Structures are given as structure tokens and as C-alpha cells.
Image: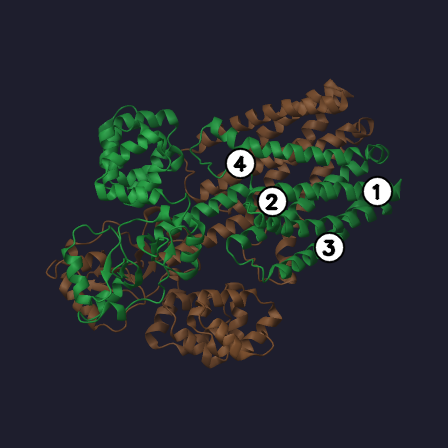
Chain colours: A brown, B green
Amino acid sequence: IEAGDQDRLDTLLEPMHAADVADVIENLSPARRRQFLTLWSGEIDGDILSEIDEAIRDEVVLQLPRSVLADAVREMDSDDIVDLIEDLDEPEQREVLAALDDSDRAAVEQSLTYPEYSAGRMMQSEVVTAPEHWTVGDAIDHLRNEDDLPDQFYHVVLVDPRRRPLGYVALGRLLSSPRTAMLRDITEDSFRPISALAKEADVAYAFNQYHLISEPVVDEHDRLVGVITIDDAMEVLDDEHEEDILLLAGVSEESSIADSVVETVRQRAPWLTVNIFTALMAATVISLFEGAIARLVALAVLMPIVASMGGNAGTQTLTVVVRGLATKSLTTANTWRIIRREAVVGMVNGAMFAVMMGAVAYIWFRDPGLSAVIAVAMVVNLTVAAVGGVLVPLTLNKLGADPALASPTFVTTVTDVVGFFAFLGMAQSFLL
Amino acid sequence: IEAGDQDRLDTLLEPMHAADVADVIENLSPARRRQFLTLWSGEIDGDILSEIDEAIRDEVVLQLPRSVLADAVREMDSDDIVDLIEDLDEPEQREVLAALDDSDRAAVEQSLTYPEYSAGRMMQSEVVTAPEHWTVGDAIDHLRNEDDLPDQFYHVVLVDPRRRPLGYVALGRLLSSPRTAMLRDITEDSFRPISALAKEADVAYAFNQYHLISEPVVDEHDRLVGVITIDDAMEVLDDEHEEDILLLAGVSEESSIADSVVETVRQRAPWLTVNIFTALMAATVISLFEGAIARLVALAVLMPIVASMGGNAGTQTLTVVVRGLATKSLTTANTWRIIRREAVVGMVNGAMFAVMMGAVAYIWFRDPGLSAVIAVAMVVNLTVAAVGGVLVPLTLNKLGADPALASPTFVTTVTDVVGFFAFLGMAQSFLL
């Protein structure tokens, strides 16, 4: 299709949703994407542009003819423009801003004054407001006469003369109330204005926890500056999850299926480098017991089992803890309960697999001493894995780091070192 | 506080949001929870009940006085009742159904006829509809006179005389249009009815991908049976992510921070059992080379490094692939590109770390042959890890299994076996 047939492209992509067109663009190889954009760039509009993944959007923006870009941004909501512009370099930023009309530009510039990943960057400035003394009839008449309404809105926000939000009315409520009802009498309980400085992850959490649809955003003086809607919160929630899952696997949070080989290597290598150092630490522990291994090779055969079981048990615990922290279900109130529970679970699992592994080792090597040593090492390592699996992410979190980022390395280092040390050390002391 | 002081509890919990009260209840230990419910069960309402985690909701329901339960369910939306009732045993189910009025009961029973995890179970039956020939004025008058409206709704769905949905009007649009406008002229483009049999994961994906707010649900005859709103989709999305992240770590998807020791052991042990078998396979590979290890103990020191690097690289790749499948960004169209990319990335990373590890091994053991062997084994294992990391989840997905569930085991088994075999095998052939 990329063989230059513009008409076929048109017929194929015309009926598609902007989000799907964006996916098509993301899935092309970089070279194909360039061909595609030369052919089809005239048709790229604001909707498609805001759906394209950040990783490749810069590239797409740079290739778009200036006039197409200007038209595209003019039809975007202010939050999508902010999202687009924050990744661009200075000259392109200025170009996009110049294409906007004055009120949009002011809104985007205000949004950019807030820190990255804050509610101020998520919000759109287009809000429907009403003075608190209005009736339902006043509001409906106002809406009918206003021609610059946002594409989607779910509440009318009541503001005082200084533009401080006082409450909001759901549209369903507005429609089902008599024209004479006062807006202030039909406001919703769920009203909870968000500070523009709030972290986006906390905003997404609040939307999910309290089933919010849209919430007003206020500045330091409690004045209304914008509104955040649930679809933006859903996107942030999705990104946060994605980040957690990738970080836990040691993949850069910016990775995307559309990345090139070079980018992918760059994203994966750092973690592998860390891993080679921790693996060398484990190897150093083993080398302390070279003499023992030379005399009893069965130790070399069995030692990875102890380490691997510890690594797995540790990963289980730390994942539950990282999720608990992310969903705010792990709090100071239940931390001690969780540490105790995990330690007991570690000991119980350790005891179960100690019996199993002791039996297997006996059948294999017919050496009761070796069986006893691997059994005890298993209990020790699974207990350490459990405690480490709780304490490492909790400590990282206390220090202000992302617990998903470094926990797996720390925990598996601990379980490897303890696993090899406990097993080989006990073997050297008691068997040889 | 649990010392029996009901008044203090009241003052503490009164101002809290139902979702937060539910969190408090979840975070209590089972014994405390029982005390709490005896004290405070009178105050548990439908909102709190629908927020409580499924894992402990049965327990809470069983302890509630029957009259409190009946009052609670009567104020719940039909989708929340379905969610509650599907986890209960027969006698409790019947009790809850008996407490409902006829129309609610019919709605809940219809929902229960659809399979678990389908759109039919997610939907609420409360929908606001209008005949297609109505004007804006007709709709507003109807809404003002109707007293049984859903708590929250975002669209008025246009239906034909056989209740087939034809389009919908956003409330914002309804409010801003003149009373004489025809509803059918102001419908939204985003309209895409969902089959009641659609999988809930696909529904959540569609809401996220197309920024939907609420969508009508239709039965096999295209008749309107309910509506799904974005907050339900957000919850499913959240659950799906949670499930993926827990499954990747080998933890049962039902695990919760509130679980007891016994439940936790039961959730974690199966995966550890699988892991002990795969670790035994790796140990068997090592035992094939006992002679080589006895003659050159350095092999035992270095072998876990090769296996561990392969395991890490494999986990990185498989996580990206599992996420790609979950977000539908990995499709048949780009599968080959991803396999090629990962294989090349694996070789490049393999080569980089081969050089690094070869150098370290030489400095450590001053044996050029050993350095060469570990370097080549590293390239082999990282390449195998990359290819395995793509093929294993893709194959599981093709077979209809959840790729997050078993991938990590398969992939680390492959990297352990290949890692040990390549390193020890080459050492035996070329060094001894």
C-alpha cells in the first residue's frame, strides 16, 4: 500500500477512528512512516495528532507541513496542545503557540507554568461556569447562546465573583430540574476541587477511588483555572500501570512497541548492566566456597535451586507490596501486619519446600547431611526473601524513589547472596 | 477504637467517603472486622457495600443483619447488585433478589443470564431513552417529569419502536440546542453499541481507545438492554492491569493486601511448586557436567551469571510483548518486525555483555579459553532469551491462554537450561 497509492490509503483510512489511524502510524517502521507522511500528511488532523504515542509524535510533528500542523492544533483542546507541546523543542513550541488564537495561547502558556506530571498540565482550560445566584433556566439559556462550548462537558461549575468554585451541577440534574430551581440547591456531593499542583498520579487515584467524572482545578488562590475529565484520568492511570509493569521487568518506562533496535538496546542495557554486577556479587559468594564445591560437586548442582526459589518468592512479595503502595491500600496502619504476614508466609512456604527439596536431594544423592543442609537453606532463604520483599520497596518509597524501579534488583541480589551463602556455608561447616 | 466505642466510630467515619470507609474495613484484620461489623453494621449502606473488595465482601454480607442488607441493596444500581450477587452462594443470592422490587429483580436476573466477565454483567439496566422523533424540548420535559432517573447519566439514547438504539445525544449538546431541534440531528459520532456478550476487557479497551463516556449495550436482537459507563470501564481496566502485573510475578490474580496467611500461602505455593520443578530441570542439566565442574570449579562460579542475564533479558522482552498484546498494539501486522527487532536487540546486548563478561572472567581466572566460552554462551543465551521472550507469550496467546500467566516460567526455564547447557557444554568440549 505504501507504494504510492494515495487514493487507496484514503479509502482505507477514511472510515477509521482517529485513535486507530494513530495506531496504524505507530506500527509502521520508521522508514515506512516517512513515506506515509509524505503521502498523507494533508489528512492528519488534531484528533489523530493527539492520539499518536509521545515516543514518535515529535518525529511526526517535524515532518508535517507547517500549515497542516497549525490547522491541527487549532482544533485541539488546550490539554491536548499542552501534551503535544511539552515534548517539542523551543522553535517548534513557538511555532505551535503562534498558530493559536490569543485565548488558547494564554491557556496553554498558563498550563505550562505548572510542573510536569501535575494536575495543571492535565487540565483543559475550557470550563462551563455559572454564577451561584443563577437558576436552572438561566443556565440553560446561557448554554443555548454560548457558541464556544467544550466538546464534552459533564458539570456546570458554580463560581463566586472572584472565580472560586463553590460546587457543581451535573448535566443530568440540570436537565431534570424545573427552570425555576436554584443551581446552588442541586449541586452534587462528589465535588472536590483539585489543586493545580497535585500530582497526576494522585488525581488519577482520586478519580478511580471516588468515581469522579470531571473535577474543577484551582490555583494557589483557590481560583478556577480549568477542569480535568475522567478520560484524561483514565489515560494517566493506564500510563502509571504501564510504567509499574515495565519498571518491575527492568524496561525503561518510555519503551514502546514502535521503538527501533537502537532505542530498545538503550532502554534494556542499563538494567542488564546492573544485573551483571549483582550476578558478579553472587559469583563472588560462590567463589568463597570453591574448595567445598571441588570436594562435593552436588553442591554446584543444587545451589541454583535455593537461589531461584528465593528469587521467585521475593518477586511475589515485592510485587504485592509495590501494588499495595500504588493503590494506596498499603498504609502505615497495616504495614506491620503485612510484614508479619509475609514473614510467616515465607516461613511456611520455606518449610513446605524444604521438606520437598530435602526428599528430592536425598533420593538423588543419598546424602542425609546434604538433604538437611538444603532444607534449612530453603527455609532461611524464603524467609529472607519475604522480609526483603516487603522492606526493600517500603524503604525505597520512604526515600522518595519509585519502588517499582529498583526493588527487583535489590531483592534478587539479597536472595542470591543469602541463598548461596546459607547453602554453601552450611555445607562447608557441617558436611566437609 | 475497636474497644466498643460506637459513638467515636460514628464521628470518625461519618464524614468519610464510602470508598474510604470500605478501605478501612478491608484493612482490618479478620477478627477486628467481625468486632467492627457487630458494632457498626447498622450504618453499612449500598455505597459502602459496593466499594468493598470482592475478596472479603462475602464475609461482610454474611455478617450483616438481613434488614440492613435488604436496605443496602435496594439503593444500589443494578450493575453493583450483579457484582455483589455473582459471588454469593445460592441461599444468599435468593435473599438479596427477594429484597429487590420487581423491575430491579428482573434487570439483575437478565444480567446474570450473560456469562461472567461479559458486557452484560458490567452494564446497568437504568438507561434514559427517547423515541427518535422527539425534539430537544420533548426530551427535557420528559426528564423533568421522570422521577426514576439513574444517579449519573451522560447520554439520552434514541431508540426505534423495537427498542433498538439508533444514536445518542450528549447532555451538553441537549442543553445547548434550541428546544425545537430534532434529537436525531444532534447525535454524537462516537456512538458504538456494545454487544452484551462482548468480553469486559475488550469493552474497557474500547472506552480507553476511543475516549467513550457511556455506551449502550444490546442483546442478540440488537435491542437495548443497558448501558456501560466509563467508571465501570475504568475499574475493569484497573483490574486487568492488576491481574497482569500479579500474574507476571506468579501471584494469584485474586490476591489482596487484606488476605490472611493461609490464603496467601495458597496463592503463592502453586507458582513456587512449578518453579521448583523448572529449577530441578536446570539442576539436571548441571549434573550432566559434574565431571567438568569437579575439574574446573570456576565453571560453578560463573555459570549462574550466564543463566541470570538470560533470565533478565527474557523477562524484559516477554513483559513488552505481554503488554503489547494487552494494549492491542502488537498485531499480526507487526509481529514479524517485533520478532526480528528483539532477536537483533538480544544479539547486540549479548555481544556487549559478552565482551564485558569475557574481560571480567579473564581478569578473575586468567584463562583465555574460559573467557571465550563465557562470552559465546552469553551471546547464545541472550539471543535465545529474546526469541523465547517473544514466541512464548505469542504462542500462549494463540492457544487461548493468558500470556501473562505462564510466560515467565517457560522463558526462565528456557534461559536457565540453555544458559547452563551452552556454558558448561562448550567448556567441557573445548577446555577439558
Residue B19, visible in the rendered structure: no
Q: CA distance from mark 1 to mark 4?
A: 37 Å
The mark that comes first in sequence, 2 or 3, is 3
| Amino acid at circle 3 | Met
Place residue A223 in its image quadrant. bottom left
- Disc 2 and disc 3 on one polypeptide chain: yes
| Amino acid at circle 1 | Ala
The residue beneath circle 1 is B427
The residue beneath circle 2 is B407
Q: CA distance from mark 3 to mark 1?
A: 21 Å
> Residue B146 in the image: x percent, y percent?
16, 54
- Please, which chain is the residue tagged with disc 3 on? B
- Disc 2 and disc 4 on one polypeptide chain: no
Left or right: A74 as drawn, with respect to A420: left
What residue is shown at x 50% (from left), y 77% (from top)?
Answer: A41
The residue beneath circle 3 is B352
> Residue B243 in the image: x percent, y percent?
48, 43
